[in-house]
């Protein structure tokens, strides 16, 4: 305990930038216990994120202005690291000798691998428009075609051919349509390897954490930067540790774990990196396939990564895969998954230091968990199955698809429901209920082959399931089997945002493959009956901390973490000295002003902002993008919102997928500024990359909600309020109607280098200019 106290006393105050943190990057440590402390959060702008982006890219050109030596200390060298920080340490480039990375640091990052999928051609066009002609490290890049594989139109086939040709010209590993979903390919082909870091231009890159690989999403412009330079920028998120206790009861799955976590803790891990931990007994009850399901959906939980430990359960899985790979003559898997590599990995497996510091600690007792269902139309609404069954919810469509839950083990679990029912039906597989359509698509071709060999694929076909090619399909709202107006669907996939899987007038639920299969069989949302509610069960045991019995030492540890958290929050929100005026570049406006149009919703996701059915169409005009803007949230938005309005929304705006059109569609609507209580991290990256400005002003959101609380509900409301952002003075002024109150709020600085990116039209154009400058200087 004395060691912890001494470390706290020695720990230097983290040297924050003079700017407040970026729009979607919260204070480094925020303990749940501190919610009652009346310490205001400073409103924030995109500035720090953009600064890091500009400086990280500058560092790639050898002109970095970051002086790490100013923040490097002897105490920091001795700072224990989380597993996340240790992995990032391996892939951070340009660090001074002896520098140990920690949460909050901005780094230049060279990941082991970068995967792109159907968006590979848009990334390629960005890559070429930057002036790049050769991929910097072809072995770093993986391309898979997986999203729109059912689309056989001339335009889509042409795009797929362009991607394949580009991959061939540059010697890039390429997996064609039908081979499998990119995230599954990354794991089963050994690109996502324990203790390494891999990124992808897709929001479900968290998936790799299921095998101990730190996976996180990047956006298209980031991917183009990696192609051109092998690098991008990243800020190491605050790390939350989730301690799992107990073991999973019979009939409870990994899907139930993550659906429950999304509902029980809701937004507690927003923009955090997650590390799962637990005893060997607990973790052995979570097989690797279940871990991938959980890691995959940490995206929906709001996290940036979801990392499982490198342990004996993972080793057993890798040994099996290494043996399997050695037998595969027709695949290159054996180059990456070998017993020798597993030996090397477990000779000294990477793990968090025992005294590593975490921003938050949560726990969940698996033994008290029951089957859960998510929805309708929200991942954050989680209901125990036994409660939902009582509502007799009729099902029209059921889906066992996606990278989340469509591996051979998932297909086997679904098939078992029908096989068990066959035992009471003269050993004949029963048909799905009348009026129900069941769709199945394997996560990859090898997973389908395994399911076929086991007889599970055929069992589902015998029950009346309709097969789809290995790919994303209905999960992303593409291809056959989409929900029609008024229908109810239940899916083993990862998202059920309104309109994502079809009509916005349909209802979508998420559940395990077993529950999906049982629901298709009965025609109502129901389970297979394997789980029995324990006598005296009183609910799921969960909370903040580790779940261990409290002790004096743990109580003091919690107190110290609260003290550190409070210090960080006060540092970030203190007004302090009067700020100097921000330099304004010639031609950049000193003030931005407009009427507030209010979309009152928390967790307004990218599917709401820009529909999935248009995401992989590369020829959508600006006019059509403007019409599609907010289509799945409010179809009337296109008539209500006007050019130069300022869009204001709730908290965690722009969560969900990595589609950059969520930002560009708002720009197409000629809205220059978005204000929210907080932003999803990936939306923040896309915004500054595409020259959309954004501010976090929680006070404004609360004032709007209080003012219009008694008014008729309007999804999109013209408020009559105006907001003026004084860029030079770094503050906003809000006037609450023509004769209403007027007030000001300090916001983060928008410095000159970020103005340059915005003025250039986004990061792509800015990088292009920088490449030209570098070429001119070297000639």
Image (cartoon, helix red, strand yellow):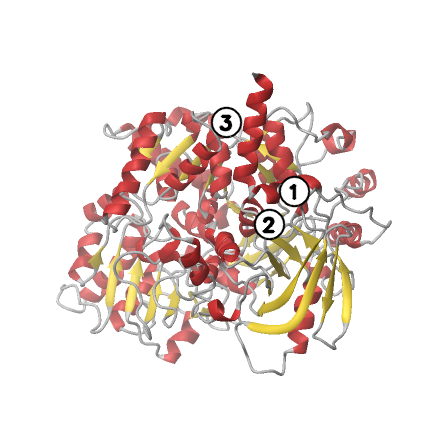
C-alpha gap between disc 2 and disc 3: 30 Å
* 3 or 1: tag closer to the N-terminus: 3
Mark number displayed over residue 347: 3
* 2 or 3: tag closer to the N-terminus: 2
Is 249 left or right of 552, judged from the image as shown? left
Q: Are marks 2 and 3 in contact (CB under 8 Å)?
A: no
* 1 or 2: tag closer to the N-terminus: 2
Query: Can you identify the residue that label 1 sits on?
Result: 754
> For residue 594, which quarter of the picture?
bottom right
> For residue 449, which quarter of the picture?
top left
> Depth-wise, is mark 3 or mark 1 nearer the camera?
1
Q: Give the answer, above or below, for where 734 lies relative to 45.
A: below
Mark 1 falls on what kind of element? helix
Q: Residue at x 23, y 53 (%)?
A: 468
Percent position of residue 291, x then y: 44, 48
Mark 2 falls on what kind of element? loop
In the image, 165 versus 281, the foreground residue is 165
Mark 3 falls on what kind of element? helix
Q: Is residue 549 visible?
A: yes
Q: Give the answer, above or below, for where 590 lies relative to 438.
A: above
Mark number displayed over residue 272: 2
> For the N terminus, which image quadrant?
top right
Q: Give the answer, above or below, for where 597 lies relative to 441.
A: below
- Binning the other alpha carbons within 10 Å of mark 1 as few (below 14), some (14 to 19) or many (20 upward) gives many
Q: Give the answer, above or below, for where 311 lies relative to 98.
A: below
Residue sticking out furthest to the right: 577
- Binning the other alpha carbons within 10 Å of mark 3 as few (below 14), some (14 to 19) or many (20 upward) gives few
């Amino acid at each position: 305990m004395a060691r912890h106290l001494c470390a706290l006393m020695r720990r230097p105050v983290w040297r924050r930038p003079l700017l407040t943190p970026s729009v979607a990057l919260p204070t480094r440590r925020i303990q749940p216990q501190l919610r009652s402390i009346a310490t205001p959060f400073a409103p924030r702008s995109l500035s720090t994120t953009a600064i890091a982006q500009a400086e990280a890219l500058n560092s790639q050109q050898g002109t970095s202005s970051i002086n790490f030596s100013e923040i490097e200390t002897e105490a920091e060298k001795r700072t224990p690291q989380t597993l996340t920080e240790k992995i990032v340490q391996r892939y951070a480039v340009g660090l001074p000798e002896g520098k140990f990375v920690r949460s909050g640091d901005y780094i230049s990052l060279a990941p082991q691998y970068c995967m792109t999928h159907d968006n590979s051609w848009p990334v390629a066009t960005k890559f070429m428009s930057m002036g790049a002609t050769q991929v910097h490290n072809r072995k770093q890049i993986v391309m898979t075609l997986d999203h729109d594989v059912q689309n056989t139109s001339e335009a889509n086939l042409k795009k797929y051919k362009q991607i394949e040709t580009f991959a061939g010209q540059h010697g890039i590993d390429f997996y064609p349509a039908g081979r499998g979903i990119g995230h599954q390919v990354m794991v089963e082909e050994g690109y996502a390897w324990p203790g390494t870091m891999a990124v992808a231009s897709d929001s479900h890159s968290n998936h790799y954490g299921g095998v101990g690989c730190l996976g996180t999403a990047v956006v298209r412009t980031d991917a183009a930067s990696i192609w051109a330079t092998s690098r991008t920028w990243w800020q190491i998120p605050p790390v939350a540790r989730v301690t799992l206790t107990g073991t999973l009861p019979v009939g409870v799955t990994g899907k139930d774990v993550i659906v429950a976590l999304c509902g029980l803790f809701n937004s507690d891990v927003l923009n955090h990196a997650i590390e799962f931990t637990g005893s060997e007994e607990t973790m052995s009850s979570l097989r690797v396939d279940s871990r991938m399901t959980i890691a995959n959906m940490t995206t929906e939980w709001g996290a940036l990564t979801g990392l499982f430990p490198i342990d004996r359960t993972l080793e057993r899985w890798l040994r099996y895969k290494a043996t399997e790979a050695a037998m595969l003559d027709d695949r290159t898997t054996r180059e990456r998954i070998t017993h020798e590599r597993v030996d090397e990995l477990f000779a000294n497996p990477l793990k968090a230091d025992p005294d590593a510091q975490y921003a938050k600690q949560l726990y969940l007792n698996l033994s008290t968990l029951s089957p859960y269902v998510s929805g309708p139309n929200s991942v954050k609404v989680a209901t125990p199955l036994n409660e939902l069954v009582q509502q007799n919810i009729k099902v029209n469509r059921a889906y066992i698809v996606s990278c989340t839950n469509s591996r051979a083990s998932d297909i086997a679990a679904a098939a078992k429901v029908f096989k068990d029912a066959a035992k009471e039906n003269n050993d004949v597989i029963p048909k799905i209920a009348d009026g129900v359509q069941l769709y199945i698509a394997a996560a990859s071709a090898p997973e389908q082959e395994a399911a076929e060999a086991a007889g599970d694929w055929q069992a589902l076909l015998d029950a009346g399931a309709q097969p789809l090619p290995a790919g994303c399909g209905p999960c992303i709202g593409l291809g056959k089997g989409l929900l029609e107006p008024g229908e109810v669907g239940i899916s083993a996939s990862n998202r059920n945002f309104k309109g994502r899987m079809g009509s916005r007038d349909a209802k979508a639920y998420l559940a395990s493959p077993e529950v999906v299969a049982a629901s298709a069989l009965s025609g109502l949302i129901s389970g297979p009956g394997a789980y029995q509610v324990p006598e005296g069960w009183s609910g799921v045991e969960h909370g903040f901390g580790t779940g261990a019995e409290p002790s004096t030492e743990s109580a003091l540890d919690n107190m110290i973490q609260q003290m550190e958290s409070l210090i960080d929050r006060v540092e970030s929100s203190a007004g302090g000295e009067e700020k100097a005026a921000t330099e304004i570049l010639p031609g950049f406006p000193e003030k931005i002003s407009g009427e507030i149009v209010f979309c009152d919703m928390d967790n307004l996701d990218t599917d709401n902002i820009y529909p999935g059915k248009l995401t992989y169409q590369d020829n959508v005009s600006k006019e059509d993008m403007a019409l599609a803007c907010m289509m799945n949230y409010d179809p009337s938005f296109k008539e209500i919102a006007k050019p130069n309005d300022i869009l204001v929304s709730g908290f965690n705006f722009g969560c969900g997928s990595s589609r950059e059109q969520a930002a560009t569609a708002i720009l197409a609507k000629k809205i220059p500024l978005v204000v929210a209580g907080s932003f999803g991290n990936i939306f923040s990256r896309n915004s500054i990359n595409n020259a959309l400005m954004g501010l976090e002003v929680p006070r404004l959101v609360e004032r709007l909600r209080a003012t219009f609380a008694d008014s008729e509900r309007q999804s999109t409301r013209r408020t009559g309020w105006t907001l003026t952002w004084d860029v030079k003075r770094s503050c906003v002024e809000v006037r609450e109607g023509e004769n209403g109150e007027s007030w000001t709020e300090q916001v983060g600085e928008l410095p000159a280098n970020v103005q340059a990116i915005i003025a250039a039209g986004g990061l792509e154009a800015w990088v292009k200019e920088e490449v030209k400058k570098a070429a001119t200087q070297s000639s």
